Amino acid sequence: MKEISGWYRERMDCCTGFLFKRPVVSKQTKMKRTVGVCLLLVVMFNTHAQQTAADCNCPTPKGVKFLNFCTLVENQDSRYKQQLREMSCVDLTKDSPETILAKVQCMWRRFFAEFGCDDSGFLVPQGNILKYAVNQEFEYFVDGVVEEFDLDINLKDPADGKTLLDFVLDEVARYKKNPEYQKKAKELQEIYDHFKFDLYALHANELTSKPHYQSGVKINLAENIKKKYTGAYALNKAPTNVYTVVFENDKLLMSLNGSKRSELHAESENTFFLIPKNATRYRFTINKEGKYDLTFGNQNKATRVN
């Protein structure tokens, strides 16, 4: 076979320094190329390490900052996002969106235990700010830190060893005991369901046994899992509106009353989204009859009809 000019095959291992090529070149050229590539990899690794260190190199915020943060949540003050950036040494004029996220997430991990609050009506002394937000009826704070900074809400609170989800469930049980507070118990149950199914909050005993899903992050599902959700779903409050879910070309597609089909992207094994940043999630759950129901938006439920 005629040799193609300039074409060669190459395999290289920088760790051992071996280089194999066709056509054969001089030992000096082999060495130069090997050293060059290895140096490039070293530079790339060091640059990444330096960037990571820089993102996590913010001084410890003063204690008053954490105290003021409790006040912001207590007053349902939207400036909590600005405060988190300041506590993370974010420079909005220089930092990229990726760097901002890295800085705030690092600060959150490092000083999570410092975000403790006290209040006469808060039953967890020095309980974490996430729990305090629910106690102050400012649960939107939890949505805000997840949406804006993708903060981890599945961390154990050193004050009691429990997670946010544990706390909300405890509150549901506490209010259910009093007949006068059934409305409050129902509201907390809805918050619990939202945290569990939309934000993927976990109980402390689930942290090591269950997968950690992230809102807006697509995952891959097996074909047999996708197929079990196919069918027609009639909206309970308007039965003439029928959502049809089909499996085609390894995709789960949904349409309303025969309109254009849109792809459902899996966020967890039974929760899907159309657009990552859109808050609407489509969740499939099994009902008492063993069939799947479709829930989405503001508690809209559609029952499977075939």
Image (cartoon, helix red, strand yellow):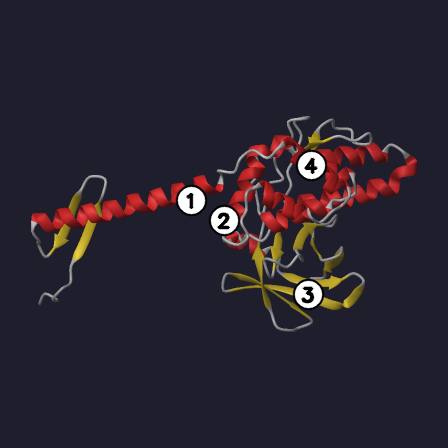
Q: Which quadrant of the view contains residue 154?
A: top right
Label 1 is placed on what type of residue? Gln
- Secondary structure of the residue carrying tag 1 is helix
Q: CA distance from mark 2 to mark 1?
A: 9 Å
Q: CA distance from mark 3 to mark 2?
A: 40 Å
- Residue 64 makes an appearance in the image: yes
Q: Tell which circle, 3 or 2, labels the residue nearer the N-terminal end.
A: 2
Q: Tell which circle, 3 or 4, labels the residue nearer the N-terminal end.
A: 4
- Secondary structure of the residue carrying tag 2 is helix
Residue at 65% over, 73% down: 259
Q: Which residue is mark 1?
A: 51
Q: Which residue is mark 4?
A: 129
- Residue 221 makes an appearance in the image: no
Q: Nearer the viewer, mark 3 or mark 2?
A: 2
Label 2 is placed on what type of residue? Thr
Outermost residue, right side: 180
Depth check, front residue: 149 or 172? 149
Is the Cβ of the residue at disc 2 closer than 8 Å to that at disc 1?
yes
- Secondary structure of the residue carrying tag 3 is strand
Q: Which residue is mark 3?
A: 243
Q: Tell which circle, 4 or 1, labels the residue nearer the N-terminal end.
A: 1
Residue at 50% over, 61% down: 250
Q: Which residue is mark 2?
A: 99
Q: Nearer the viewer, mark 4 or mark 1?
A: 1
- Secondary structure of the residue carrying tag 4 is helix
